[in-house]
Structures are given as C-alpha cells and as structure tokens.
Amino acid sequence: MTAMTTVLFAVVGARFLIPLLIPRYPLPAIVAALVLDGIDQTIFQSFGFDPPGYQGYDKAMDVYYLAIAYLSTMRNWVSRPAVAVGRFLFFYRLLGVMAFELTEWRPLLLIFPNTFEYFFIAYELVRLRWDPARRRATSWITTAAGIWVCVKLPQEYWIHIAQLDVTDLVQQHPLRATALFASVVCLALITWFAVRPRMPAPDWPWRITADPLPHGMGTAARRSRWVAARGRLLSVATAEKVVLVGFLAVIYGQVLPGRQSTDTQLFLGVTVFVVVNAAVALWAARGAHTLESLLAAFGVRLLMNAGLLVLGGQLLRLGGGQLNRANTLFFILLLSLVTLLDDRYRPVYQARFPPERQRSA
C-alpha cells in the first residue's frame, strides 16, 4: 500500500468514524468532523495527491455526518422548538444536496445552505452552561435566521459560486486577508469583553458530554417497551425514515462507481428495505427481543439486511439483472446504521415530547 493510499484511507475512515461520536460528545465531535471536512483537501495536496472525483464523495460524506447529528438531536435535545427548527434545516439541506448531485448546478448549494450544521453547534454552545429548554421558539428561529443570512449565505457563495478558499485570498489579496483576520479578532474581543459579561448566570457547570436520557428511557430494553406500546409501522416516523435513508442513498448513488440502477429504482429499493427494517424492529420490540449493545444490534441488523440482499439478488437475476456487490454492501452498511440509530433515538424524542393528547390523558 502506497503512502497516498494510506492517507486516503485514513482521511475517509476518519470522516466516517468521527461522526459516530456525535451522539455522546455532540460539540467536540461535530467540530472535529467540520474541521476534517475543511482540511481534507489540504491534506491530500500536501502529499501531492488529488483523488479523482473526491468532490462528489466530499458532499456525500458531509450529509452522512449531518445525518448522525440530526439523529442525535432526537436523543439529546431538550427543546422541542430547537428540534423542529433543526429538522427543517437538515431536510432542507438534504434536499438541496440531492438536487445538486442530480443536476450539478452549483447555485443550488447557495439556495439550500448548510445552516443546520452551525445551528447544531449554536445549540450545543448554549447547552455547555445554560438550559436550552428555557429559550423560546422565537429565539431558536432568530438564531437560525441569523446563521442563514449572516454566515452561511456568504460562506456558500464564497465556496460554491466564487469557488475561492482562504489560500486564494491570502495569495491574491493580502490586505483583504489581513482585514478579514482583524475583523475576526475584533469580533472575538467584543464577544469576550462586551457580550460575555452580560450573559445570564450559568445554569450548571460545563457540560461536554450529552445529558442523561429521560427517566425510563436509559436502556434499550425500556425504549423497546415504549415502542411496543405506542409504535406503529404506518406512521410519520417511518415516512421520515424512508425520506432520510432514500435521499442519502440517491446522493451516494451519484458518486459510487458501477451503479446500474436508476435513481427511482434505488429510492424504491431502499424504501422496501427501510419498511422491512421498521417492521422487524417493531416485531422485536413487541416480542421483547432487544439487544442492549448497540454494536451487537448493528451486527444483527447487518446480517438481516445481508439476507434480504441475497434474496433480492436472486429475484433480480430471475429478471436478467444483477447487483454491484461493492455498492450494495456499502448501501447495506449505511442503511443498517442509520435505521438502527433512528430506532434507538426516536423513542427518546417521542417520550420527551409526547403529543398533546397523550399529555392530557
């Protein structure tokens, strides 16, 4: 294995593994994922390496770690309005990235900016010292709007329309680069000396790790009992899961080599897998067949989906078609991980924020 191949595997591996820490260590993990996303190309260039087609993979890996972050909001966030705003921002961006991958029209990335990522960071910065549940819905909406207009629109234009980076700015316009750096320093000083002293008293000491789960939802077995009593296969939750995994599959389908299916066929095939996974998860919950270990549960789900894959491959061959094994294995890994995390975290959100009719019962 050459040094370049080792670097490529190390970077791509880190981009897939670091996001798995987001549910437990939300702020440091998503910042690490964000930083790695920003420097991966620089790492390759320092080794004189430009992976072919990496730009497409880069966008696909972005939505992967954002999907993990979105799922973790259902596990961790204690503000229902914040979860609602985050859900809109995430799916809005997901739709935009999918549209971009299908059309390659770069302005779509400006029209559908990645506001969710910085909104997630803003929430977790608040949670470090203060209770997010005490903030009103208007506060979260204002926060999202400010990030959208003042941060993400200029950033998305800079990156995707002007297609510039900080290196270009420093080399071509040193005075502007100096002014930009001075502005950042001034903003930091204003925040520290003017904004910080006016902040309310902290509600608690520094909190880096995720908060404990609600009472009665701390184990997979207890969440399973909750699902057994209230879960439904035909539900908004299943529909959202279909959209989430289906869109992710279509986005990755644009960059994986050797794909033989159309986007519609891919989405419909993933839909079948998601619905079957949801049905099996509901059956397991009602039969008290729950594995506490997340790793063990992932292994079982992976084996189940591999069996479904074998069956699907047999049916496909009867019609004269065939599966690309490498691509299919990747999709099975992605589908198994996302659906499992959704099944583990969604009951926490539903128990923390029950519908009005359940609260009044």
Image: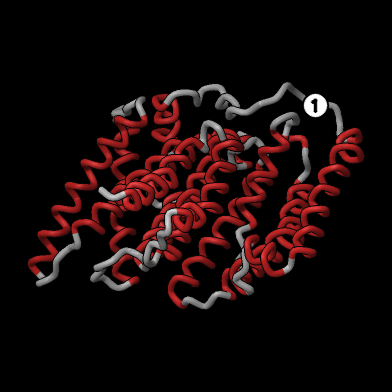
Which type of secondary structure does the marked residue at label 1 adopt?
A: loop
Q: Left or right? Give the position of 123 relative to 249.
A: right
- Looking at the image, residue 168 sits to the left or right of residue 41; the answer is right
Residue sitting at 32 percent across and 45 percent down? 336
The number of numbered badges drawn on the structure is: 1
Q: Can residue 334 be seen in this snapshot? A: no
Image coords of residue 270 (percent x, y): 32, 59
Location of the C terminus (image quadrant)? top right
Judge whether 173 appears above or below 86 on screen. below
233 relative to 110, above or below: above
Residue 5's x, y, as percent?
Answer: 32, 51
Q: Is residue 101 something one can see in this rendering?
A: yes
Image-based side of 189 in relation to 307, left or right = right
Nearer to me, 354 or 106: 106
Q: Which residue occupies 19% across, 57% down?
A: 325
Quadrant in the picture for residue 355: top right
Residue at left 70%, top 25%? 206
Residue 91 is drawn in which quadrant? bottom right
- Residue with the mark numbered 1: 202
Q: Residue at x 77, y 40 (%)?
A: 135
**Colour convention:** secondary structure
Q: Quadrant of residue 359?
A: top right
Q: Disc 1 marks which amino acid?
A: Pro
Image side of residue 198 versus residue 95, left or right: right
